Image (tube, rainbow, N blue to C red):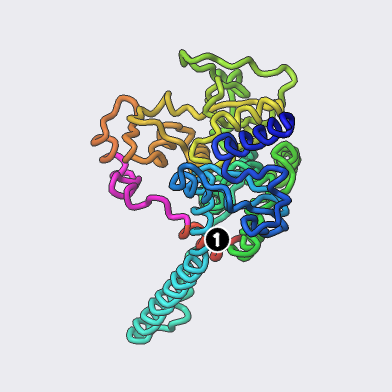
Amino acid sequence: MEGNNMCSTAIDMEESIIPDSLPHNTITADRSTDHSPAAEEGEGGQIHDTSVVEPNAAAGSTQAESTELVEGDGQSSTPISKNQLKKLKRQRVWEERKGDRKRLRKERKQDRTARKRAEREERIAAAEAAGLNPEEVLKTEKPSKQQLNPVPVAFILDCDFEEYMRDPEIVSLSSQVVRSYSQNRHSSHQAHLFVSSFKGKMKTRFETVLSNSHKQWKGTYFIEEDFREAAKKASELMAGPDGGELVDVLRTDGDQAAKQGRVLDTTDASPVPESESVDVDKSVVYLSSESPYTLEKLEPYTSYVIGGLVDRNREKGLCYRRAREMKVRTAKLPIGEYMAMQSRYVLTTNQVVEIMSKWLESGDWGEAFLGVMPKRKGGVLKGQSLETQDSDANANGGKSLEDDKQNGDSDNIAEESAHNPAPET
């Protein structure tokens, strides 16, 4: 009897401490087989004990909400954090508004088409009123096709970071790729543009939402392999008859001959990472702000890799570590040598492409930065005031502070332009 009483007491003690010692959604082995009315069978055959009452019901209800989602086949439930709940909520809102975004793009396209049709009819009416042949007038008003002037330099957009990005960020990266193509295409000197690791959700977006418009892009190549394979293809292309012309800014002679292939060590007081490996690939430069080297000039027959990562600065140093692992050179743009910034500014993928495209036009980093860096961020050339710089930009047809404010982030416009690419030669 004493043994039985001891066992009974032990069982009573065990049951009395269950609410305090176990999570509210944990069920002990003996209760999981209980078929009494107090135990209810849930989805997937899982038993939910409704007879256990939490000491703090209010707190328990909040925690229960975070354990509603069941992973796998529904046999086990795992609590998720508040950040994960917020992420799921953002994802749900994004999916719910997909139809609205599609409708808005369609309306904008219709408005643009109607506006162009009205303008054309006005020109025809004006020509007829003047006694002119409308067809001849319209033909003379057509913009002349821009001639392609490729140079033996390649820009590679490394898009192998999908696992680090949310769906809206992948959409933003897609828009940046569209902008990169447009900026390179309309530059006076075009680099060979490669998009590496072109797969997954971004590829699906280009094939569906953007209607495969990228297949019409001239001088742009999409490959599923990584940036190293893209660099190999770029080297073969640049060495061939279609590699492009060696323009003045890429030529080296006299005192500049020794500078070819060089990057400058920074004088930054921050710790300098280990030096580059002796077997590093000299024909590839991965651009990263974490690099201890600063880019002095663009080199002919060289591929410059730009990390296609839109993560709101969550994954710091990811591109630099990737470059080190792949044994390629690294460098950062000489922003600190030319610009005085009032705050830290992270360049987008298309802004890096635009800066390097402008350098190919002028060979002047200061001019390239001045034409791209947002003035609302307080970026000015060293030795100049904001007022002087703004007046110079207006005099040269550059972007003023007000223009920069109006530009903002217009990803939808960038994607719309992908459906109507510029006339190709």
Tell me residue 262's x, y (percent).
60, 21
Extent of the magenta region: 392-411
Crowding at dot 1, Cα within 10 Å, few <14 / some 14-19 / many 20+, comes out as: many
Q: Which residue is mark 1?
A: 418
Q: Amino acid at mark 1?
A: Ala
Which x, y percent locates residue 123? 38, 79
Is residue 394 one of those drawn in magenta? yes
Determine the residue positioned at 27% across, 34% down: 386
Q: Is residue 402 magenta?
A: yes
Q: Secondary structure at mark 1?
A: helix
Question: Which secondary structure is most common in the magenta stretch?
Answer: helix
Q: Nearer the viewer, residue 52 or 157?
A: 52
**Front position in the image: 155 or 99:** 99
Residue 49 location, x and y as percent?
62, 51
Residue 118 against residue 265 in the figure, above or below: below
Residue 203 falls in which quadrant of the image?
bottom right
Q: Is residue 283 visible?
A: yes
Q: Quick one: which residue is furthest to the front in this view? A: 1
Image quarter (top left, top right, bottom left or bottom right) of the C terminus: bottom right
Question: Residue at the spot x=67%, y=57% of the render?
Answer: 36
